[in-house]
Image (spheres, rainbow, N blue to C red):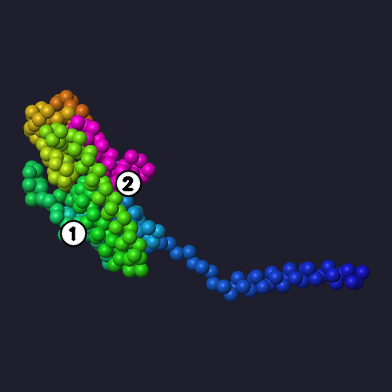
Amino acid sequence: MQQMLKMSRVPLLYVLILFLALWLAACAAPATPTVGKPMVVATTTQLEDVLNNIVGDRMTVVGLVPRNGDLHTFEPTPDDVRKVATAQAVFKNGAGLEGWLDKLIVNAGGQRPIFDTTQGLPLATIDDAFDDRGQTDPHVWMSPVLMQGVVDHIVAGLKQIDPQGAAVYEANGSAYKTKLQELDAWTRQQVATIPPAQRQLVTTHDAMGYFAKQYGFKIIGYVIPSVSSEAQTSAKQLAELEAVIKSSGVKTIFAEKSINPKFIDQVAQDTNVRVQELYVDSLGNVGGEAGTYLDFFRTDVTRIVNGLK
């Protein structure tokens, strides 16, 4: 009997020893802390998407202007202040686009890198609009060629705040620039199917200048004659625009998804032309037809080509 009791205690003793060893090991080994990825902020949806393509898995990218939003009328919220306050850096479009950003940075405590992604690029000035003559056109995302320069600025900024990731950023930036070059070549092929005389654009506001110059279009009018959708239009300006549309023979005029179509619908009705909607100032919903910058641009080009043929 005693022999049986001794044998029954042996497994229990082993269990107790094993438990004690595991407990001591757990106490001796420091717990691995859960550390979140560094975060960077993009002011526009276009920059947000391009940044996501370049950072890989080294950083988290958050945007300020929402999808399908109007960046000209955007007003930061307290949550946007929190985003900027906790970010490693802010990447902005520049060229006078984000008039609200300086105050936002101050409210977030300042003291963080801000990278201007259009600095030094060959930007155009508005020389034929009503109230914006001489202003810089900030809509660089309407040219995949200019966006290659934006990529270079993004890569340089990321390398500055995270030198250890330089090789990743350079490789991803180079790969994305190749995609932009392919997008430019594809766009030229698509535009070539439109007879040159029919390459005339009427849009909601003056945001298509770089696109028109890059691909041989003539902009014959805007419902809102301004680089900003905040501007107002007059009955006289609308009447002049309608006269131009009637004399030009255009078949389609182009609205913008992020802007109220009231005026452009009225112009289309008065002139008996079609209205086609474009994504201009913002990307569309994630996963949708304009959810990435590349899809955004392809969608617009396809609609322009189909509308003007």
Q: Can residue 24 be seen in this view?
A: yes
- The answer to whether any part of residue 92 appears in the image is no
Q: Counting other residues with Cα less than 10 Å from the Cα at mark 1, is it few (<14), some (14-19), or many (20 or more)?
A: some
* Secondary structure found at label 2: loop
Question: Dot 2 surroundings within 10 Å: few (below 14), some, or many (20 or more)?
Answer: many
Front residue of 238/116: it is 116
Decide: is 276 above or below 99: above
Q: In this view, does 73 lie above or below 263?
A: below
Q: Where is residue 150 in the image (x, y as percent from the top left)?
A: 23, 56
Tell me which corner region of the image, top left, top right, bottom left or bottom right, holds residue 199: top left
Disc 1 + disc 2, Cβ < 8 Å? no
- What amino acid type should be assigned to the residue bearing mark 1? Gln
Q: Does the magenta stretch include residue 2?
A: no
From the top left corner, tell me how far across and down residue 297 is, in percent. Answer: 26, 43
Residue 136 x/y as whole percent: 13, 52
**Residue 307 shown in magenta:** yes
Q: Mark 2 points at which residue?
A: 292
Q: In terms of depth relative to the viewer, which is nearer, 56 or 95?
A: 56
Identify the residue at image location x=75%, y=71%: 14
In the rendered structure, which amino acid carries the disc numbered 2? Thr
Q: What residue is pinned by disc 1?
A: 119
From which residue to which does the magenta span run? 283-309
Spot occupied by residue 131 in the image (x, y as percentages of width and height): 9, 45
Quarter of the figure with the C terminus = top left
5 sits left or right of 206 in the view: right
Residue at 35% across / 59% down in the picture? Answer: 55
| Secondary element type, mark 1 | loop
Which is more N-terminal, label 2 or label 1? 1
Q: Residue at x 33, y 58 (%)?
A: 172
Q: Which mark is residue 196?
A: none
